[in-house]
Image: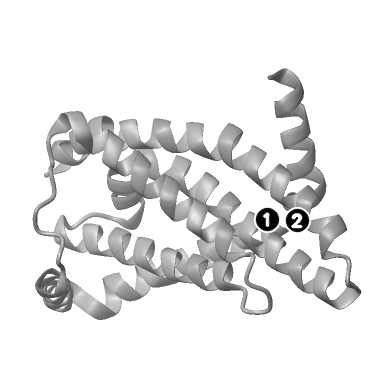
Amino acid sequence: MREQYSKTFNFIKKDILKTYCICFVIFICILVLTTCLTYYMVGVDGLKSLIKGLHETSTNENVDASENQIWYAFFIHNSLANLSVIISGFIPFLFIPLFIMIFNAVINGFAIGGFALVYQLSFLTSFLSGIAPHGVLEYMVNILGFALGITLCKQMISGIKNKNLKTTIPYYIKNSLRVYILVILPVLLIAGIVESTITPLVINLIK
């Protein structure tokens, strides 16, 4: 197991780290911008209208919210979402993981700004109470998933142009799968447990 983790982190450092850092900067910039726009331009009335519209168009009305299944639901949902981002990297030229990342940052910024509006909090308090307990962990591995997907897309393009897909892609598939299993899944499991236990307690303290 130690050897597997060593190979995993060597791959991240060698092949993913630069892309990860770029993704991190882009994600945080969009997150902050969307948070500010939501807070200063949407306002409480606009936020209520948006939430009402989302609720009316939602088809997920029969969610089992029992405490025994919440953490599991969070874990499964986030794991599948992360995996789908990585897999989308196999579609060359479109850079789908990049657009998913941008959308994800916008949604999270909207959530932070909206939470601050509803409870009349500062941005920092909104983030620390409603997002940070579990969100920091999710952000870390979600951005890692985005970076993996983008890297796969770049390698697909390079392989097509250089006609060496069969020699380069297996290396990235094997190592991406190792990162997903050994790093992303364990962190998302912890984040799911925190989101279903600690985050609600923190939110209730400020209501």
Report the residue marked by disc 1. 21
Displayed quadrant of residue 5: top right
Rendered position, 36 above or below 146? below
Rendered position, 127 above or below 192? below
Q: Residue at x 12, y 69 (%)?
A: 55
Say few, some or many: other residues with alpha carbon within 10 Å of mark 1 (under 14 / 14 to 19 / 20 or more). some
- Which is nearer the eye, 41 or 101? 101
Name the amino acid, label 2: Lys
For this orientation, the residue located farthest to the top is 2
Tell me: 84 left or right of 92: left
- Which is nearer the eye, 21 or 94? 94
Displayed quadrant of residue 38: bottom left
Tell me: 121 left or right of 14: left
Displayed quadrant of residue 51: bottom left
- Quarter the C terminus occupies: top left
Say few, some or many: other residues with alpha carbon within 10 Å of mark 2 (under 14 / 14 to 19 / 20 or more). few
SS type, badge 2: helix
Report the residue marked by disc 2. 18
Number of the label disc, if any, that sits on residue 186: none
Q: Is residue 132 visible?
A: no
SS type, badge 1: helix
- Where's residue 71, x and y in %? 28, 35
- Which is nearer the eye, 165 or 13? 165
- Where's residue 153, x and y in %? 69, 67
Q: Residue at x 9, y 53 (%)?
A: 62
Name the amino acid, label 1: Cys
Q: Residue at x 31, y 67 (%)?
A: 110
Q: Would you say the residues marked 1 and 2 are in contact, meaning their CB atoms lie under 8 Å apart?
A: yes
Q: Measure the C-alpha gap from mark 1 to mark 2.
A: 5 Å
